[in-house]
Each structure stands twice: as C-alpha cells, then as structure tokens.
Amino acid sequence: MAQRATPLTFRGVSRLSVGRGQLLNLIEVLLDPVVLVATQWAVALSLEHHLGPRDVILSLIVFSLTFPGSARLDMKPWSAVRHILGGWVALSALLLIFGYASRYLNEFNLDVIIHWWWIALVSLLAAHFLLKWAAPFIRELQGPPRRVVIAGMNDQGIELARRVSQDLYTDVQLVGFFDDRVRTRVEDANAFPVLGKFADMPNYVKKNRIDVIYLSLPMA
C-alpha cells in the first residue's frame, strides 16, 4: 500500500497521525473527553445520587470542547503536566464565564463543581501516565510493526523518517529510502539507509514484506 507523504501530511498534522496504530490513536483521542465526563458524572452521582438534565448538558458541552484529545505521549513528564494543567484551567475558566453569563451556573451545586474540578484534574494526570505506561503493551496487541520504505530522499522524507524513528509508540518500522539522486544534497541523509534506486523498489517490496510505501516526491 502506497501513501503520499507530502509536507501537508506530516507537517500540518500532529504526530498523532504519523505511525500510530489505530487502537492507540483512538484511546489518545478519547482519553480527555471520556475522563472529564466520567468524573463529572461520578461526582454528581456521589453527592446528589442522580444525574439531572443540567449534568447531561454540561457533559455534552465538555465532550464537544475537548474532543479530540491532545497527543501527549511524546511529551516529557513535566511538559505533559503543564499542558494538562494549563488546558484544564483554561477550559474551567471558559465554562465558568459561560455559566455566569448565561446564569446557568446557579443551577449547579457548588460542592459538585469544586469536587469535580480537582478530581478531574487528578484523573487527567493519572490517565495520561497510565496510558504512557500501557502504550507499549497496547502497541503489541496490534501485531507486528508495519515495515515502511520512503520513496524520495528530500527534506520532507527525512523529516518523516526522523519522526517515525524517534516515536517510541509507533507501530511502524522504517526500513530505508529509495532515490535516484545524490544523497549528499540532503542534510542528515546519512542517518538513514538508501536501499536502491526507484527501479529497484518493486522487487525489494515484494521480497522483504514491505507494508507501506510513503511517496515523498515533487508533484511534477
């Protein structure tokens, strides 16, 4: 299967779409909204013993504002903590401003709001580090990594190769490049193997169980 790796494909899109398996992608996308809605419902049920229409409306607003979730697996621990804290503070402020302006805030129990705020924050942090710990096991559940070659050793192809190689959670194994041009014209080209010229690629793909071909070639 061939995929065109244009600059828009892997520069304009976050790492979430480069080399990650579908299951890990899905979990990462749903993690924040599911955790926030689940903690909101848990606090409301614990303190009020029921879910009212206001709780359902709030959960729908929160889910819509946080979906899709952020990709944080590649972040360092403190960077992830700052990102989660900053995002939750910003979202909380937005919800409070909206609730105050619409007078919808008066419909909620203050204890529910206070408890949900800190429980949601702690749960987001715990869920992130739990996913980070479980990510290698989730990746193994998806089977062996897909073997990938890149047609075209240029700046875009090198950037794609670097991202795939440095991502600890990818299900992609980069095998190498195919190109007819001189590799010295590209910076950092020696960091990745050149397997042959474009004419050699069909036979190599057949003999070496290549699953994906990324095309990093000029539109011409």
Image: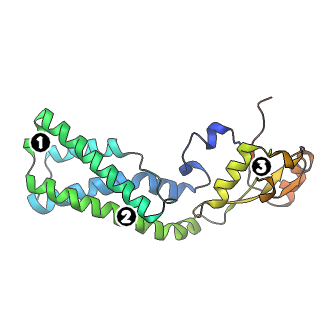
- Residue at image coords 41%, 63%: 78
- Residue at image coords 91%, 50%: 200
Q: Position of residue 63 (x, y in %)?
A: 32, 46
Q: Quadrant of residue 116?
A: bottom left
Q: Does residue 25 appear to the left or right of 104 in the view shown?
A: right
Sequence order check: which comes first, mark 3 or mark 2? 2
The CA distance from mark 1 to mark 3 is: 56 Å
The CA distance from mark 1 to mark 2 is: 28 Å
Residue under pointer 2: 127
- Residue at image coords 60%, 60%: 167
In this rendering, does residue 122 appear at all? yes
Sequence order check: which comes first, mark 1 or mark 3? 1
Residue under pointer 3: 187
Q: Amino acid at mark 3?
A: Glu
Q: Amino acid at mark 2?
A: Ala
Q: Depth check: 54 or 115 in front?
A: 115
| Residue 12 position (above or below residue 188) | above
Mark 2 Cα-neighbour bin, 10 Å: few <14, some 14–19, many ≥20: some
Sequence order check: which comes first, mark 1 or mark 2? 1
User: What secondary structure is found at the residue carrying circle 1?
Assistant: helix
- Residue at image coords 89%, 43%: 181
Q: Position of residue 90 (x, y in %)?
A: 29, 46
User: What secondary structure is found at the residue carrying circle 3?
Assistant: loop
Residue under pointer 1: 105
Q: Depth check: 29 or 211 in front?
A: 29
Depth check, mark 3 against mark 2: the one in front is 3
Q: Position of residue 89 (x, y in %)?
A: 27, 50
